[in-house]
Amino acid sequence: MNKSEAKSRIEKLRKEIEEHDHRYYVHNKPAISDFEYDILLNELNTLEKKFPEFIVESSPTQRIGSDITKEFRQFEHKYPMLSLSNTYTEDELRDFHNKVQKASGGQAEYVCELKFDGASISITYRKGILFRALTRGDGDKGDEVTLNVKTIRSIPLRLSTEKVPDEFVMRGEILMPRAVFNRLNEERIKADISPFANPRNAAAGTLKLLDPHTVASRSLDCMFYFLLAEDLPHDNHYDNLMEAAGWGFRIPDSISVCRTLNEVIQFITYWEEERKKLPYDIDGIVIKVNSLRLQEELGITAKSPRWAIAYKYKAEQVSTRLLSVSFQVGRTGTVTPVANLEPVFLAGSTVKRATLHNADQIALLDLHLNDMVYVEKGGEIIPKIVGVDHSFRNDRSRKIVFISNCPECGTPLVKNEGEANHFCPNYLHCPPQIKGRIEHFISRKAMDIDGLGEETIDLLYNKKLIRDFADLYELKTEQLIPLERLGEKSADNIINSIRKSIATPYHRVLFALGIRHVGETVAKTIAKKFKSIDDLISADIEQLTSVREIGPKIASSIISFFADNDNILLINRLKAIGIRFSEVVETSIKSDRLNGKTFVISGVFQKHSREEYKEIIEKNGGKIATSISGNTSFVLAGENMGPSKKEKAEEYGVPLLDETEFLKLIGEE
Ligand code: IVH
């Protein structure tokens, strides 16, 4: 391709990509698949690399940081992202006010804003176009999350007015509405993914997802509260925000200018109640000095400005009656007391239960049945009891006694020295432990067996069809069909899904065994160090603890697991079924990304063999051809690709992908 051909191809590609961006980000109506989009972007990138003289700042490759793998790069904040000092009382607020009055000679005006509880974001606009979005990071540099931020409909990509500073930064808070949060967590719980603790974590977690499509599906929102530029339009914070509102930014209408401390306190009091009606969480009020000149005079301390302060609300609490305490037995036998409460509305949802952690906690609260208790939502999703209102105690109150026998199997409970929890030692025969182990075995991150939920496991267990997870592989469709609520089709699906799980990789099988303290990550580490289960079974405590991440607690749990002959018998049965108990090199994830695409593979490769590439392409839905023709979609080109093949590819206009580009495109790198 000569220079002028390259130039016109580059321009054509840019136009096309911009159109797709617009369809996707503004209208949410993509016309092509991600893969096809990446191909266009990739071709543009390659051409720009070859002809760097044609690179311009507005090229899609530059606008998204030419980051086609969508990994996060770090950039410095032009203006450091400071935090705010917190106050909790009116006295502290008065101190702040006095200091400000002193510096201003008594003329200070404040802007009061809601303190949104989400993830802060800093977005740079250049020539009216969204250029780059950074998370707070350490305040000096943040992660680039531009692509994800662009999916948020309330954030303008391009401003409709030209009367804006050449470059400016908008700061704001990315929020997940409580309703979206509740829905998302329900879905996660159903899919056996751990729920987010609160909307803030959910928003922050979503911003860091690698796939902007998933981000787009999470309905994030954004509220802006800060405009920064070298040449600001006004000399006070409030007018600057209002100006930004005129440019198309979403500035909350709760913002208010207060001229006295009393007005500030009124604002705080008003929102303390009113905040409960908002669709998202706020955790306080931010009070900012309005005048920029005075802000500058007051300056900043090490990490926060002296011209602003946050007034934090106390976590919302309600009082309700403790009706009863139940004791739950988990899959590892741990007994957890749970408080059953008179239903009460708290911070956006109805609360009926609260965790009581363990016997110590009950003793600490000196909890009695029928007590009026204070409930609070902390960082955790399950609310907790933080205190008792003793004035309500009456004759009907009875001290709660921690049970001494397992509520499920009657075995006397055990409490190990130094541990807070009681547990049921009847590992082999206690029903919730057996069912819990099977539920864990089939869960998504373990063997990922579809169609079997808690209820079906219950049913199968009660009908004596399963007693351990190896029994699952002996189930027959005919046995499932007569079970309540299971038709032929779901029975078939379950059996297929069980059969499919035989190919689950070794590290997930290890996790699925449910060895105490061996979570997903530890299981991966173990699988890397002990290439087969036999290596692991024969490992002694020293060999185990020599692995980083494996401490004495995990090591002794592994040793005692394999010391139990029942577990060895179970593993032998699973082995006979064909479950993988050693590491097999996986070449690829399966997808349909390459559907309808025909590849010709040519040359020598570094990262995978030619055979492996063939497998990867086929596993992702693509086809392999031996010679280049008009039907070829791509050539996967290694080193030493023959010149005649190259010519042929050029003749048919077939793009060449090197192995790195290819792997990036299918999400392998
Ligand atoms: S102003 C120097 N205004 O609170 C000014 N921050 O600890 C700093 N936040 O990380 C920010 N609502 O993400 C400001 N109306 C608001 C805010 C707000 C929430 C967050 C922000 C920052 C943290 C400050």
Image: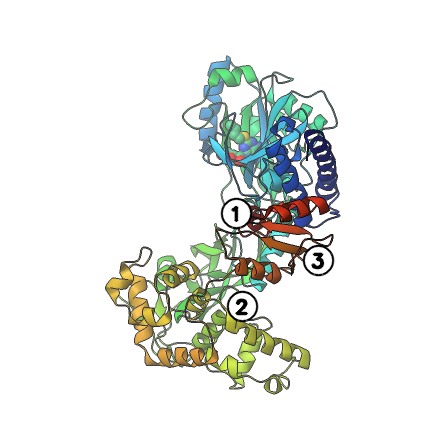
Measured in 3D between alpha carbons, the distance from the residue under mark 3 to the one under mark 1, in whole angstroms, is 39 Å
Nearest to the eye among marks 3 and 1: give it.
3
Q: Tell me the amino acid under the disc marked 2.
A: Asp
Q: Nearer the viewer, residue 538 or 161?
A: 538
For residue 235, above or below residue 202? above
Q: Are marks 1 and 2 in contact (CB under 8 Å)?
A: no
Nearest to the eye among marks 3 and 2: give it.
3
In the image, farthest residue toward the left: 542
Q: Tell me the amino acid under the disc marked 1.
A: Asn
Q: Earlier in the sequence, mark 1 or mark 2?
A: 1
Q: Are marks 3 and 2 in contact (CB under 8 Å)?
A: no
540 left or right of 395 in image: left
**For the residue carrying disc 3, how many other residues have a C-alpha within 10 Å: few (<14), some (14-19), or many (20+)?**
few
Return the residue at label 3: 596
Return the residue at label 1: 201
Q: Nearer the viewer, residue 597 or 177?
A: 597
527 left or right of 372 in image: left
> Residue visible at 63% across and 82% down?
484
Nearest to the eye among marks 1 and 2: give it.
2
Q: Position of residue 30 (x, y in %)?
A: 73, 47
Query: Dividing the picture into quarters, in which one does residue 131 lie?
Result: top right
Q: Tell me the amino acid under the disc marked 3.
A: Gly
Q: Position of residue 216 (x, y in %)?
A: 65, 47
Q: Position of residue 633 (x, y in %)?
A: 69, 52
For residue 36, above or below residue 542? above
Q: Earlier in the sequence, mark 3 or mark 1?
A: 1
Measured in 3D between alpha carbons, the distance from the residue under mark 1 to the one under mark 2, in whole angstroms, is 26 Å
Number of labelled discs? 3
Residue 448 got which mark?
2
Q: Position of residue 230 (x, y in %)?
A: 58, 18
